[in-house]
Amino acid sequence: MNAKKTAPQPAENIEELVAVLKTWQGLETATVAHTTDIIAKTKNPLIQLVMEIIRRDSEMHHRVQQVLLDSIQKQAITLTPEELGDIWEMVEKHAEMEKATIDLAEKARNNCRLFVQRHLLTYLIEDEKKHDRLLGQLQDFKRSIYPYA
Amino acid sequence: MTPTPGEHRGELATILKSWQMAETATIERATEVIEHTGHPVIRLAMEIVLRDSEMHRRVQQAILDGPERQAFTAEELREIWKLVEQQSEAEERRLEFARQAASACRTNVEQLPLTYLLLTYVVEDEKKRARLLGCLENFQHNRYEDV
């Protein structure tokens, strides 16, 4: 008997992905309820702000997970050159703005010596970098669609 | 000459105000892209940017208002700490799901590139939130570690 473990096939991975996404969605729903509970129980504006960041992120994660599930179970998402071409100039301008914003954000943190403020600034910088990467990935798509662009 | 704390604060306020304006411009630009495309992933990516920018403006305003003035007491934190801890544990579980999903998708990345793009975003966001809660935990234990 061959005991060697074989790598999971793509279909198995898809099933696993769907199962994980559904459980994960359940956790995001619980997080929305839980953060709402914390917000109601504290008057401190900082704790309220942190909990609201988490709550809003959870709401968006739930939507992204649903788009992912729909793309796997209902209809695959494709991206055509026409779809990308129409809005590309706008996306590029947006990406430039994100880079300028990151510079500004780093400058702000360099000028800040206060503990709480530095933590909040670090959160903002991470989020700005996340946007930059997200737009960078769209740019990668464009390059694979238009390899000589 | 080394700038004084007052000069630092003044410069920080100037930067934060310019940054808030940049966020407003980002919101306008993302709204414009959303209006010009029907593609679900591009719309979603722009909506993420738009909603984050709205929250960034609020955080920048909180920094401008001086959070040290409204900093919480250890007592305030103790009262809600059990809830925050539960939140932190749930965060760990979500992070684990995020890793599992990314790993299940990685072998299919060529067939599912857009799925991978969206998953990468959620994974990064989960990590960011775990760090944010870690920061509150530092306050609770009076650890003022720099970032």
Image (spheres, rainbow, N blue to C red):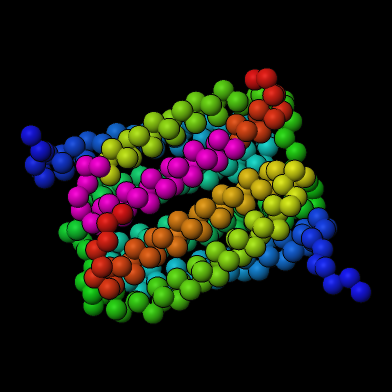
Q: Find the magenta span and give its range.
A: A110-137
- Relative to residue B109, is residue B19 drawn left or right? left
Q: Is residue B31 visible?
A: no
Is residue B114 rendered magenta in the image? Answer: no
Query: Magenta region, mostly helix, strand or loop?
Result: helix
Query: In the picture, which quadrant includes the N terminus of chain A?
Result: bottom right
x 10%, y 38%: residue: B2
Q: Is residue B71 above or below residue B52?
A: below
- Relative to residue B80, is residue B71 drawn left or right? left
Is residue A136 rendered magenta in the image? Answer: yes
x 38%, y 65%: residue: B134
x 69%, y 48%: residue: B115
Q: Is residue A20 visible?
A: yes
- Relative to residue A76, is residue B65 drawn left or right? left
x 45%, y 63%: residue: B130
Q: Position of residue A120 (x, y in %)?
A: 32, 53
Q: Is residue A98 above or below residue A89?
A: below
- Relative to residue B70, is residue B119 drawn left or right? right
Front-most of residues B76 and B132: B132
Query: In the picture, which quadrant includes the C terminus of chain A?
Result: top right
Outermost residue, top side: A148
Q: Position of residue A86 (x, y in %)?
A: 65, 24
Q: Quadrant of residue B42?
A: top right
